[in-house]
Image (tube, grey):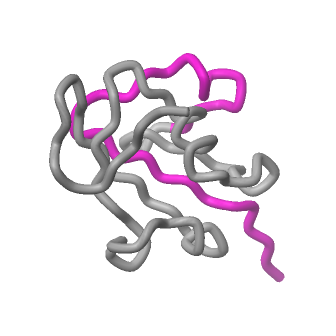
């Protein structure tokens, strides 16, 4: 597991913003502002590692965006996050 910590930058860490929507907001840690939280994560962190750290069910991580750009499921463990990236995750959405 990656050591993800809200607040206070750690050595060899970078800040990202994690945004969870709809039913995923319940997985945010205390201190989250509505649907997002700023995190310190180590260099080399990927969307997949953040998903694992927050125990997000894989079947609920339908749409993953980094800075508004879609990250396909087979790229989520390869695409490294960068300082100040926004990682947004949406569950499947149904409507009528």
Q: Position of residue 81 (x, y in %)?
A: 38, 28
Q: Residue at x 45, y 66 (%)?
A: 29
User: Left of 28 or right of it: where is 33?
Assistant: left
**Whether residue 23 is situated above or below residue 20 in the rendered picture:** below
In the rendered structure, the answer to whether residue 88 lies left or right of residue 41 reads: right
61 horizontally vs 79: left or right:
right
Give the magenta-colored segment's residue range: 70-96
Looking at this view, is 31 or 80 the one in front?
A: 31
Magenta stretch, overall SS: loop
In the depicted view, which residue is nearer to us: 43 or 10? 10
- At 56% from the left and 17% from the top, the residue drawn is 78
Q: Report x, y in % for residue 51.
A: 60, 44
Q: Quadrant of residue 33?
A: bottom left
- Tally the marks: 0
Is residue 64 shown above or below 43?
below
Left/right of residue 61 with respect to residue 41 in the rendered view = right
On the image, which quarter does residue 26 sit in? bottom right
Instruction: Examine the image and state in which quarter residue 76 appears.
Output: top right
Q: Residue at 75% across / 57% down in the picture?
A: 60
Instruction: Tell me, yes or no, whether the highlighted magenta stretch contains residue 82.
Output: yes
Q: Where, quadrant-wise, is the C terminus in this rendering?
A: bottom right
Q: Could you say where residue 92 lies in the image, as x and y percent from the top left?
A: 75, 61
């Amino acid at each position: 597991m990656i050591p993800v910590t809200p607040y206070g930058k750690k050595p060899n860490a970078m800040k990202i913003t994690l945004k969870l929507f709809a039913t995923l907001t319940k997985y945010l840690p205390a201190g989250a502002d509505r649907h997002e939280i700023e995190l310190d994560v180590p260099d080399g962190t990927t969307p997949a590692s953040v998903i694992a750290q927050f125990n997000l069910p894989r079947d609920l991580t339908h749409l993953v965006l980094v800075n508004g750009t879609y990250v396909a499921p087979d790229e989520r463990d390869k695409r490294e996050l960068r300082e100040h990236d926004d990682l947004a995750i949406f569950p499947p959405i149904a409507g009528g």
